[in-house]
Image (tube, helix red, strand yellow):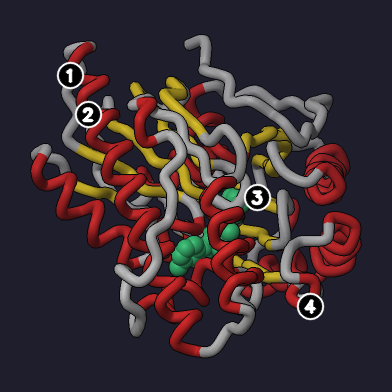
Amino acid sequence: MLVFAVETSCDETSVCILNHDKKILSHIVFSQKEHIKFGGVVPELASRAHLQILQHISQEAFNKSKIDIEDIDVFCATCGPGLIGGLLVGSTFAKSLAFGSSKAFVPINHLEGHLLSPTFNNNIVFPCISFLLTGGHTQIYLINSVGNYELLGETLDDALGETFDKVAKLIGLSYPGGPEIEKKAKNGSARTFNLPNPLEKQRNLNFSFSGMKTAINLIVKKHNFADQKFQENLSASFQEKVVSILESKLALTIKHLNNRKINISQICLVGGVASNKYICEKIKRVAHNYKCSVVLPRKDMLSDNAAMIAWACLQKYLKDPISNLHFKASSRLKILNDSK
Ligand code: KG4
Ligand code: ZN
């Protein structure tokens, strides 16, 4: 079986051809550059860029893999959540190919793509927990099996990746801010600035990052300059605070599961922020105290990519071979658990 997948939910235009033996025959990720000068994603520009590039990279994927479009058995695309313009471009493109070749179309939830990404390169023992850390979402899930997810907590305001991007912009670093902050933090002192942790006393599994952004804005205004040392120290202080918030949420998650008599041995970190090596190393150490290992997706499946969408599709279609050409893309699509 051959799957062709499209991912266009934000500012990455990506396609992938995957076979049923888990072999990635072609995978192209095109990161749009037009957003850099705005310091964040401009939805209208993103949709136009998807429209311009999608056909080219699809052709390239078929050429490189020497696969004919007629050989594809299942077409799939991210149908949400995300920016609606991009979702419509990608899903309509994949649906048209499926319709034109009388093949199946499978709608994929972007978050499920991220959640299942570590199952591609690891032996996952269910139940496990997953910290989904992206530019649009920050959530903790209990995963009981493929297709069965329980949301345990999430951000009440900004997502973690979004906070990295906004903080980077405030201190004069470029977009996307996550990798820039990680780089700067290497030479900074994490003890320079004391930043808030708004939900510290509430001891639940939700997050709040908007206060951090406000606090950093005030610090930036007070200093009135952004020299290299200032950027490094603020980056290190911010990154360390993020680590301490994630560590405390991990401890609360384990406690919550213990109360429910649920044993887990693996903690998955997924989404763009899980590319941060410093954060992952710190979480690994804490996880060890709970006799858990930290599991990560392959590097090319961390940030937005079509390979994770193809992989989610393959697993879902093998279990339940249903085509759904009428599925409507939605910017706020929720994860639905499988009925079977
Ligand atoms: O998963 P992703 O590619 O897209 C969404 O689904 O949103 O995540 C993108 C986010 C961006 O906000 C980016 O700044 C962040 O992931 N990110 C990082 C790092 N690399 C990417 N955040 C912290 N440290 C990094 N090294
Ligand atoms: Zn994503």
Which residue sits at x=48%, y=11%?
Answer: 340
Amino acid type at mark 4: Lys
Which residue sits at x=52%, y=10%?
Answer: 339
Q: Nearer the viewer, residue 223 or 112?
A: 223
Which residue sits at x=74%, y=25%?
Answer: 324
The mark nearer the N terminus, 4 or 2, is 4
Q: Rounded to the nearest whole Å, what is the CA distance between mark 3 and mark 2? A: 35 Å
Q: Position of residue 266 (x, y in %)?
A: 22, 39
- Residue lying at the far front in this picture: please name it: 222
Q: Nearer the viewer, residue 281 or 204?
A: 204
Q: Residues within 10 Å of mark 1 (few under 14, many from 20)?
A: few
Amino acid type at mark 3: Ala
Query: Are dots 1 and 2 in contact, CB under 8 Å?
Result: yes
Q: Residues within 10 Å of mark 4 (few under 14, many from 20)?
A: few
Which residue has dot 1 on it? 258
Query: Are dots 3 and 4 in contact, CB under 8 Å?
Result: no
Q: Rounded to the nearest whole Å, what is the CA distance between mark 4 and mark 2? A: 42 Å
User: Which is more foreground, mark 3 or mark 2?
Assistant: 2
Residue 123's label in the rendered image is: none
Which residue has dot 2 on it? 254
Which residue has dot 3 on it? 5
Mark yes or no: residue 102 visible.
Answer: yes
**Disc 1 on helix, strand or loop?**
helix
Q: Rounded to the nearest whole Å, what is the CA distance between mark 1 and mark 3? A: 38 Å
Amino acid type at mark 2: Ile
Q: Is mark 3 within 8 Å of ligand 2?
A: no
The mark nearer the N terminus, 3 or 4, is 3
**Disc 4 on helix, strand or loop?**
helix
Quadrant of the image for the N terminus? top right
Amino acid type at mark 1: Asn
Q: Rounded to the nearest whole Å, what is the CA distance between mark 1 and mark 2? A: 6 Å
Q: Nearer the viewer, residue 102 or 297?
A: 297
